[in-house]
Every structure is written in C-alpha cells, then in structure tokens.
Amino acid sequence: MEKRFEMHSGLQGETLVRKGLHRRGKGREQIRITPELNVIKIGGHAAIDYGREVMYPLVEELGLLSKNHQMLIVTGGGGRVRHIMDVGMDLGMPTGVLAELSAKISEQNAIMVSILLSKYNGIRIHTGDLLELPSLLKLGMLPVMHGTPPYGLYEHPAKSGSIPPHRTDTGAFLISEVMGAKNCIIGKNVNGLYMQNPVTHPDAEFIKDITASELLELNLENLVIEPMVVELLKDAAHIKEVKIINCHVKGNIEKAIKGKNVGTIIRAD
C-alpha cells in the first residue's frame, strides 16, 4: 500500500475548525485592496423607486463627487423585490430560490443607475469584476453594481420565515469589507435609525451613535438596516462603522464621506 503524500503546510493536519487555530491567526493584518474607496448603497425602496424626482439630483450629486472621491455605487431592489418575494413565499419557494429571484431586481436597478451615470463614466460591473476595481478607479470610472450577495441557491436559512437574511445592505457591507474600503455608507429615505418606525411613530427617538452589541441588545421590532449587517460588523477586520444617511438630503453623502455624522453611525464593539 502506497504511503499517503501530504504537502507541508502550516495548517498541515488541521481540521480548520479548531478554536485555537482561529485565535492564532486573529492578529494577522489583511490587505486593504482599495483603502480610499467609499461604498455607497442606494436602495431601491430608499431612492430608485421614487423615480426622476429623487434620482436625477442624486445622480448629479454622485457624479460630481466621483471627480474627487473613489466611489462604488451599490444598488438595492426596492418595491419589486417585495413583490416577487411575496409571490414566491405564497407559492412556497425555498429561501435560496427567493434569493435568486430578488437578485435579478437589484441587477436591473444597477443597469439603470449605471446608464444614468454614464456621463460621469458610470460603468456597470458584476461580482466577478470586484478585483478590477483598482484599475477601473485609476481610469476614472464610476462603477455601479447590484448589492445582492451571490449566495443564490446557497443562501443561509433564515432564523424565522423564509426571507433571505443576506440582502443588499449586507451585500454593500461585505463588498466594503473585502475591498478594505474607507467608508460603508447606506443611503435611506429617513434620517437614520430610530427606536420605532418614524413613519408610523413621528415622535420616535432618534439614535445618532450606537455599537453593534448595544443595537442587538435593544432587539428592536423594526430596523432601517438589515440585522445581518449589525451581526457581521462585530467581527469585521476592516469596516469598523456603518453610516446610515438620508440620501434625499443634498450634501449628506459628501459630509459622510468626509467623516461627519449626518445620520446614524453603528460602530463595531
């Protein structure tokens, strides 16, 4: 019987799940691929679904900012995602199928936003193009991509129900983390995070600054951001805060890029 051949490696004989192994590699610094990048999520429900009244001024603002700042625009799905998920859940579709269906909508929005930004060198990119970002940014391009993470049929099971837990807010965060971005800015149609839904509770208390652990401990009924972003923020290597802003207010994006708190900041612990 031939002797088994093993390649020599620092991980030789490891199961890759041993707790001590993970502690050993914890302090090792990771490469920041695009350390000056500002990832800006423009939600479908938050902005795109409003049409030209909101999008035309927003597109002009983003285009002008891109002349002085490295930016990646990430799109959400909006109302059409809610519709397709409602139909899919009614038909009993599994979580992975719902993730596949909802991804198509944010892709459509990425195409439309990239065309609107075409006069500012807007270019639609795909998930597989992320490692081309350094070159695209040096060429003066303004990349636009959809925010749905590419889990698709492999989407994680939801803790309850069947709605995919990794949606476009989460996608924008994961892109920011893997690229080692400077900022992860989530544009919404409200000023930030509230203790209650400000639409139904106009007097709801506003949360300007909070840690991920504090926010999870509050166990709020409704969040303006996907809960998965808050969960992931606790363990991130590069992104130590997520900024939620009202992208309908002109100037908020630039202020957030420059480090000002014009909405809510969720900080890692």
Image: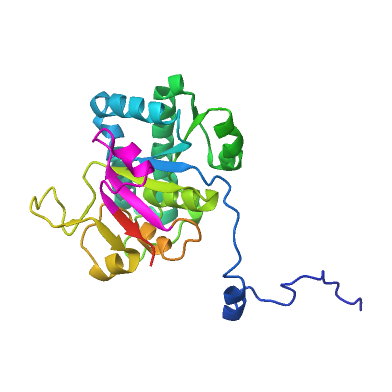
Is 85 displayed left or right of 3 in the figure? left
| Residue 99 visible from this viewpoint | yes
Query: Which quadrant: the C terminus?
Result: bottom left
Q: Residue at x 58, y 47 (%)?
A: 33
Count of numbered circles on the image:
0
- 113 horizontally vs 33: left or right: left
Q: How is the image coloured?
A: rainbow
Q: Residue at x 50, y 43 (%)?
A: 36
Magenta stretch, residue numbers: 240-264
Residue 114 vertical placement versus 229 (above, below): above
Q: Is residue 24 magenta?
A: no
**Residue shown at the point (53%, 27%) measured from the top left:** 140
Residue 138, position in %: x, y? 58, 32
Q: Nearer the viewer, residue 150 or 187?
A: 187
Q: Evaluate whether residue 76 shows in this view.
A: no
* Quarter of the image where one finds residue 53: top left
Find residue 11 and report its image quarter: bottom right
The vertical placement of 90 against 112, above or below, is: below
Q: Position of residue 186 (x, y in %)?
A: 34, 46
As drawn, 69 above or below 153:
above
Between 181 and 158, the residue placed more toward the observer is: 181
Q: Is 34 on the left-hand or right-hand side of 110?
A: right
103 w.r.t. 151: above or below? above
Foreground pick, 191 / 106: 191
Q: Is residue 94 left or right of residue 23?
A: left
Query: Percent position (x, y) of residue 59?
Result: 35, 27
Identify the residue at the far right of this view: 1
- Image x and y of residue 189, in percent: 23, 41
Q: Quadrant of the N terminus?
A: bottom right
